[in-house]
Image: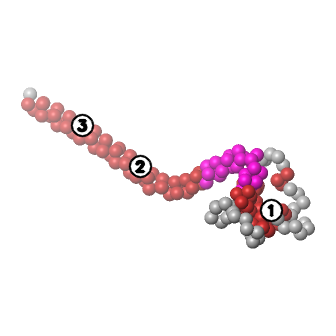
Amino acid sequence: MDQISASCLQRLSLNKLTGIHRELRTSFNEILRHTLLLSVLPNCLKLLLPLRLEDYARNVVEAKAKEEAGRVLMRMKDRFSMLFSHDSNSMPRAWTGKEDIRAITKTARSASLKLLSVMVAIRLEDEGVNFMKILSSALLHNNNNKSVATHDPLASSTWE
């Protein structure tokens, strides 16, 4: 009886060891597979994450711009008034009669026009065009320069 028990115990032990060995091999292969994935994953994330973040940021900015599009003239007027009536330190301007009103007006106009140029850039999504320069030449300078395109892409009332 002892011989049978010993033989059974040996077989059980051998089966357990074989099962444990199989489990260890499976676990090792899984760990190796995950390790390889983890070594490749950061490189994929380095490539994909900035693209997804850039798309997300662009969508947020565009949504906010669409939301504010109807109020852009009011914002431009507020910006102009703020810069015209306050000095460079944001203190209310004390008019003494010695100020260069033309320069102050031009500075305030340019700053308010920057709001419009940002809106234009978002709407047209063209990175190669200097919208501020085009808008300045069209709206700030009183010369009759017709270098501004005759087709006005901003004339449309939709974002498409």
Residue at numbered disc 3:
15
Foreground residue, 66 or 98? 98
Mark 2 or mark 1: whose residue is earlier in sequence: 2
Which of pointers 1 and 3 indicates the residue nearer the eye? 1
Foreground residue, 135 or 63? 135
Of the residues shown, which amino acid type is indicated by label 3?
Asn
Left or right? Give the position of 159 relative to 152.
Answer: left
Dot 3 crowding, Cα within 10 Å, few <14, some 14–19, many 20+: few
Q: Is residue 75 above or below residue 15?
A: below
Mark 3 element type: helix
Instruction: Inspect this view and state whether residue 85 appears.
Output: yes
Q: Is residue 75 above or below residue 101?
A: above
Q: Report the span colored magenta.
A: 54-79
Of the residues shown, which amino acid type is indicated by label 2?
His
Residue at numbered disc 1:
135
Of the residues shown, which amino acid type is indicated by label 1?
Leu
